[in-house]
Amino acid sequence: MAGDISKQMLKLNNQLDKIIDKQNELTEPDVQQALAIELITALKWDEAAKLCSEQGKEEAKRTRLAEDEALVREELETLRDELVGVSTGAVTESNTVSQADGPDSADGND
């Protein structure tokens, strides 16, 4: 049982690493803002508009990645608590199975 939890945690940690890598690939908004201002000052409207459009998309991606990161971290924390419970004997296999088979999992909307 602890092995299953550890495997789930490893999978989530890998997922978290991928999310963080994607966040690091995004351009800093302050740098792009300064560049957009320079383009506007130089009356390069088309380039400025294109840059602003790209930044709008990146901001949406940044927000989505932050939400994904928060969810994965929350899942990891839940698994950590469960692992502690298993290691101290507070949680048994029958408890975790009954939680997994709760009313939410029966509707098929997981």
Image (spheres, rainbow, N blue to C red):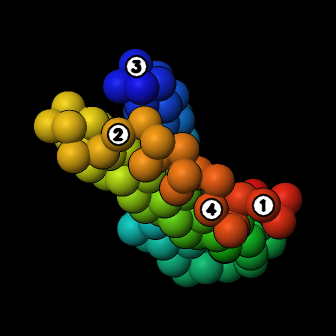
| SS for callout 1 | helix
Q: Position of residue 25 (x, y in %)?
A: 51, 41
Residue 11 shown left or right of residue 46 in the figure: left
The residue mark sitting in front, 1 or 2, is 2
What residue did someone put label 4 on? 102
Counting residues from the start of the chain, the first of labels 3 and 1 encountered is 3
For label 2, the SS is loop
Give how far across and how far down residue 43 sits, in percent.
67, 79
Q: Is residue 67 above or below residue 99?
A: below
| Residue 106 marker | 1
Instruction: Give the spatial CA distance, label 4 vs label 1.
Output: 7 Å
Q: Amino acid at mark 4?
A: Gly
Do residues under tags 4 and 2 come within 8 Å of each other at their CB atoms?
Answer: no
Question: Who's the residue at 78% across and 61% down the image?
Answer: 106
Instruction: Give the residue displayed 52% in from the left and 65% down from the top.
Output: 67
Kindly report which numbered mark, 4 or 3, lies closer to the viewer in this rendering: 4
The residue where tag 3 is placed is 3
Tell me whether circle 1 and circle 2 mark residues in contact (CB < 8 Å). no
Q: Which element carries disc 3, helix, strand or loop?
A: helix
Q: CA distance from mark 1 to mark 2?
A: 21 Å
27 or 93: nearer the viewer: 93
The answer to the question of whether label 4 and label 1 lie on touching residues, with beta carbons closer than 8 A, is yes
Q: Nearer the viewer, mark 3 or mark 1?
A: 1
Q: Amino acid at mark 1?
A: Ala
Whole-angstrom CA distance, mark 3 to mark 2, is 14 Å
Residue 104 lies left or right of residue 67; in this view the side is: right
Kind of residue indicated by mark 3: Gly
Q: Which mark is residue 92?
A: 2
